[in-house]
Image: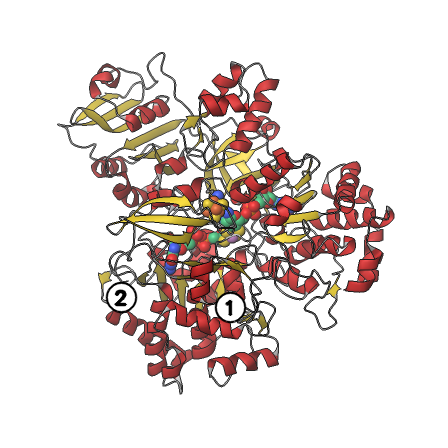
Amino acid sequence: MKEVKSTCCYCGVGCGIIITADKGKIVAVRGDPDHPANYGRLCTKGSNLHRSAATDTRLLFPELRLERESSRQKLDWDEALDYAAGRFAGIIREHGPDSVAFYVSGQLLTEDYYIFNKLAKGLIGTNNIDTNSRLCMSSAVTGYKKTLGADAPPACYEDIERARCIFIAGSNTAYAHPILFRRIEAARQANPGLKIIVVDPRRTDTASVADLHLPILPGTDVALFNAMLHVLLWEGLADMDYIRAHTDGFDALKDTVREYTPESAADICGVPAKDIIQAARWFGGSGASLSLYCQGLNQSSHGTDKNAGLINLHLATGQIGKPGAGPFSLTGQMNAMGGREVGGMANLLPAHRDMANPAHREEVARLWGVNQIPSQPGKTAVELFEALRQGEIKAVWIVCTNPALSMPDQGRVREALEKAEFVILQEAYRHTETSPYADLLLPAASWGEKEGTVTNSERCITRLQPARIPPGEARPDWEIATDFARRLGSKLRHPSWQALFPYASAEAVFNEHRESTRGRDLDITGLSYRLLGEQGPQQWPFREGESGGQVRLYADGVFPTPTGKAGFMNVRYQKVAEMTDASYPFHFNTGRLRDQWHGMTRTGTVARLFSHAEEPVLSMNAEDMRLRGIQDGDVAQVSSRRGACTVRVQSSPEMQPSQVFMPMHWGSRFMSTSGANALTTPAFDPVSFQPELKHAAVKIEKLPYRWQMVALRKNGALAMLPRVQALLPGFQHASLGLSGQDEPVLVLRVAGDAPLDPILIERLDRLMGLDDPDATLRYDDARRGISKRILVDHGMVVGARLSGETMARDWLKEMMASGLPIEQIRLWALAPVNTAPAGSVARGKIVCNCNNVSEREIFDAIGKGSDLAFLQSGLRCGTECGSCLPELKRMLARGNRFSQMPMTKTL
Ligand SMILES: Nc1nc2c(c(=O)[nH]1)N[C@H]1C(S)=C(S)[C@@H](COP(=O)(O)OP(=O)(O)OC[C@H]3O[C@@H](n4cnc5c(=O)[nH]c(N)nc54)[C@H](O)[C@@H]3O)O[C@H]1N2
Ligand SMILES: Nc1nc2c(c(=O)[nH]1)N[C@H]1C(S)=C(S)[C@@H](COP(=O)(O)OP(=O)(O)OC[C@H]3O[C@@H](n4cnc5c(=O)[nH]c(N)nc54)[C@H](O)[C@@H]3O)O[C@H]1N2
Ligand code: SF4
Ligand SMILES: [Mo]
């Protein structure tokens, strides 16, 4: 047994984790009590990390496919990297350096990121390296730079405890940054005077704890912020001394906000003027106002303006650089910050340098020992895939991201991947939506196997230690890139290739990165691997000779701009890129669920992470559904001008009229279409180039699907998953998931109206073992349209397929998960019904994941008069990670108002 310190690989909170490994296997995780991000706590995703660490779904060897239609062959690393270097060198020689591109990820470690950036900009001489952070944080970067002068979140987590007003805009903290949300809950308990304001078109779990929720119309944040500034000025709540001493550009903005009266903004935003005034008063009068914000601001065609509009409020009130105050952008991925630090984007250079600045280019060229850094900015994510589609870029190397799920407008992205001459995918997992497009697959080491550093939202750098060696032939990302770079350098006869990539360890890469920060705003010359190992996580800047990092920035009111002053940005409200109209009347919003992570390569292997949300649903306002004759569970076709997807619809009290929401997680591996991003728009912000993933116009048509089928399989569910996934496109509507606790049950749900293809069903039955006449009970009643297959192994039910009508599915699934002897259901299995036996009830949605407590059990207890303390002591829900606490509170509030408990309908 050994224990090592690491961090969680998911969100930007960056929780410290202690991993326990035994004989090369990761067997347990717990929160690191000494880590300043979480002090020992973990959310549902983090506390299930060891369950996702099994290696059976991993990519284990380099694999090459010479022709698109042929199958892939295993290679060794020398063959794979020689081949890759040969292809890249050939394309570069023929078409120039800008004919190749890299698309990397905020989930790489800082050292990985540093190497890829140097490989593209230093060795090859192309700035065509962009990252999924373009879809995530780039508006936060431009927002900070345009106002404060540098890309640095000035606040820290401790400010949550010190704030007297927390302004949360476009962030569903309860789901997306749960451990920070626990800190917000604790702050609220410790300080009853704390005011919480939430700005989100949806009434999320985060909004449910707010003193004031502003459900603004999508995309209207700038109007709200400007109106708040209008009120602050009108009511004398602005800090004129601070404005005079520490800022520039106020007068122009003041002229602009004159016209943003609360009444005019109320019209634009669709919220009462009095609420806007209240928000401004709390923000301006609290004495310590902290803003937390994320994709509701960033993923917008005016994301820079939204960020700057909010930062304007902080500058106008002097709410920055002091305890409990500041504009605090929450980072999405665990190392989105590290990527920004090493300048791993198409328009950035290492250590917060700018490509547009000739002096910066020269500094970096000197640092790296190359003649020059190309001045032409590279292609940003959306442009990069478009150039690939147009044939301008011929080869792309994709690392640690899944663009065939996460990029907007999938139709075009997939066309681009199809057209590309050469696609390398460097992945930890065998199957992703992108892997079918890859010519060369390179297996990467992943969480728990890598050595290096990451930076979280509060500028805090943690060093990760590996807990086990990577499975198969997988190698750390930085090492793969270094090995490739040496081969490519020699093939291209680069004058200094031998000196460019000398690294023998991740630490050597870190040391070079550290040197690049000398004298910059993020200077970390006082840090070393040893110090990070001995003294734990440290915040930047941390200069040579200093004894610690800087907790908060700009306490002295001096900003990293030429004048030393911050600048107001004169922002005006502008409409979203695609407004709704008569043909596409619904506003399509997308985002995250509590227990899934992006494309589900990791969370999608853990059965219990499906229990909170088993399938993708389109959430919709109940009145909108009534008007269109749509009922809970109906399948609808949702389409935009770019694409369509089929999905079940569910009414949600969170949704305003004319707005719908779909989670981003399910793509073509888990459903029969390519998911939410089949519909989204590639329109982007003109400054940050971040696409507008939160806003598209769609129409919704109910599909006349009465016919259903459910297939369930236990024992070997994970191994079966990719093979069943391959069948999904054959169905009119289908989704796939897991159920159960430790031994997963695979759940396939199908709906349609056309007769099912018998060959498809035969293939499914064969895959699931339901075709074995000796082990399967069969019942068919063509007249009633009922068909059942029950697979038995050693007296236990391990597989089932119900079609026609499938009312028994939840009951059967739960029974199978906990172990169902065939004797218990033999009569039912051969009876002409597909409803569950009388008296049996399914438990329904699991609310508390840690202790496996269902919504039904909670509502029963509330019906008997339980309060929160009683729920916690009686059912033990909400006593471990706390991720379900907001939901428990909401259920209590609802339960007290209704005589009958409004259970989530099983669809
Ligand atoms: N469970 C989970 N947690 C995650 C992730 C995950 O995949 N799963 N991913 C991580 C990553 S990479 C990121 S970037 C973060 C994202 O974290 P968040 O940004 O908090 O999450 P989202 O659900 O994408 O969007 C947040 C909210 O923006 C709202 N919104 C939409 N349009 C507007 C608008 O015009 N104005 C305002 N004010 N709000 C709007 C949406 O209704 C939504 O509730 O989460 C991180 N944490
Ligand atoms: N509609 C819609 N689309 C969105 C968003 C949205 O809100 N709405 N959000 C956007 C945002 S903010 C983000 S951040 C993106 C996220 O989108 P992606 O980056 O596509 O999401 P992930 O599934 O996290 O992809 C990471 C991949 O890296 C692999 N991996 C894990 N560890 C390692 C490793 O150590 N090395 C390597 N080489 N590979 C590894 C994983 O298996 C996984 O396939 O999605 C964006 N897309
Ligand atoms: S809040 Fe949850 S997902 Fe985010 S780092 Fe912490 S444990 Fe991981
Ligand atoms: Mo993100």
The CA distance from mark 2 to mark 1 is 34 Å
Position of 779 relative to 297 (above/below): above
Q: Position of residue 245 (x, y in %)?
A: 81, 64
* Residue lying at 82% horizontally and 41% vertically, measured from the top left: 263
Query: Mark 1 sits on what residue?
Result: 342
Q: Earlier in the sequence, mark 2 or mark 1?
A: 2
Q: Is residue 268 above or below residue 241?
A: above
Residue 299 is at least partly visible in this image: yes
**Is residue 707 shown left or right of residue 289?**
left
Residue 767's quadrant in the figure? top left
Q: Which residue is mark 2?
A: 66
Whether residue 293 is visible here, answered yes or no, is no
Residue at left offset 40%, top offset 36%: 610
Residue sticking out furthest to the top: 838
- Kindly tell me whether mark 1's CB lies below 8 Å from ligand 2: no
Give SS at disc 2: loop
Left of 471 or right of it: where is 734? right
* Most distant residue in the bottom direction: 495
* Kind of residue sitting beneath label 2: Leu
Q: Which mark is residue 564?
A: none
Asked whether 561 or 820 is in front, the reply is: 561
Q: Is residue 144 left or right of residue 787?
A: right
Question: Dot 1 lies on which element?
Answer: loop
* 590 up-or-down from 626: above or below: below
Q: For the residue with label 2, is its CB less than 8 Å from the closest atom of ligand 2?
A: no
Does 224 sit above or below residue 778? below
What residue is at 49 percent from the left and 18 percent from the top? 861
Q: Three-letter amino acid code at disc 1?
A: Val
